[in-house]
Image (cartoon, rainbow, N blue to C red):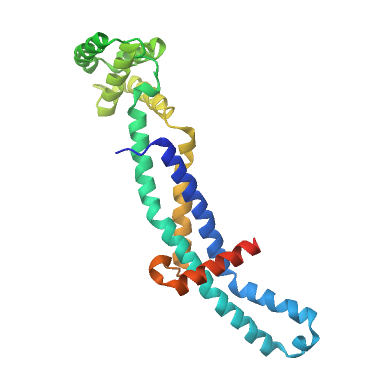
Amino acid sequence: MTIPRDLLLDEQNSIGALTSQLVSDVDRVHSTEADAHAKVQQPIAESEPFKLMGRPHHVKVEQQFAAEWRQGRILAAGARRFDLEPRIDRFAQNVHAFIERRKRDVSVTMPDALDRVTPDGMIALALLRESRTARIDSMSAADLHAVYQSALARRDAAALVDLELIEARVGRGNLASSMDERPAVKALVDHVEGVQELRVPVELNEAAEVIEAARQAVRRAQRHEIEPVNPAAAGPDVARAIEQERERAGAAA
């Protein structure tokens, strides 16, 4: 079953948001030592007794902060990866199925073509489709292109049938019976593909970028040895650590 357009757009937005959050989570894991160092610099600057404790003590405190923070940050990033990763391929498959079906839906190009067709007219249209099929299949690429252009100009019920049959014929390939016909075939195929591309909602043109960005974010998490974490299965202590880290991240944003 093809997922509706609005649900796909919602999922695209959700994946985009999760990707940004995972990138931020991994950034925090990467910057743990630097953040711990910065944390210690403040009391060094503000407290003379703490400053006089010396660098070995300061390093020890930095390491304590880093150890405490790193674990929470890794868990939070792992939970985000758990939320994001399974959705990427599923979304990619659903987008591909939607786009392929949408490209084949000639009614998107001619949404009003059947508005005035009566039930008897639908029967006549089915007979027309049957009779036109053999005729379309026997046409040269140049003739197909001429009929295609005419159908796009007319935009009536018969034009809808021609559009459907010609696009199906182009989809089957093997249109050129000689080298001389190749330019006509290319012109026809380019025109058909251009019309079909216009049927894809412009918002889904970003889907490939969203999918690639999400995959890159997951690969980066893998490089930092951040494994997926299911908070519901990991226990209350892990869930609490994730919640605390997200509160700290929100306060630091």
Q: Whole-percent x and y of residue 158?
A: 31, 11
Above or below for 28 versus 6: below
Which quadrant would residue 47 be assigned to in this image? bottom right
Q: Residue at x 59, y 72 (%)?
A: 32
**Is residue 230 something one can see in this rendering?**
no
Which quadrant would residue 169 be assigned to in this image? top left
**On the picture, is 224 further left or further right than 105?**
right
Which quadrant would residue 69 be assigned to in this image? bottom right
**Is residue 223 something one can see in this rendering?**
yes
**On the picture, is 189 further left or further right than 216?**
left
Above or below for 56 versus 229: below
**On the picture, is 143 further left or further right than 126?**
right
Q: Residue at x 41, y 72 (%)?
A: 235
Q: Whole-percent x and y of residue 46?
A: 79, 79
Q: Whole-percent x and y of residue 84?
A: 43, 56
Q: Whole-percent x and y of residue 76?
A: 50, 66
Locate the N terminus and report the quarter of the image it occupies: top left
Give whichever of 194, 30 is nearer the camera. Answer: 30
**On the picture, is 16 further left or further right than 150?**
right
Locate the C terminus and report the quarter of the image it occupies: bottom right
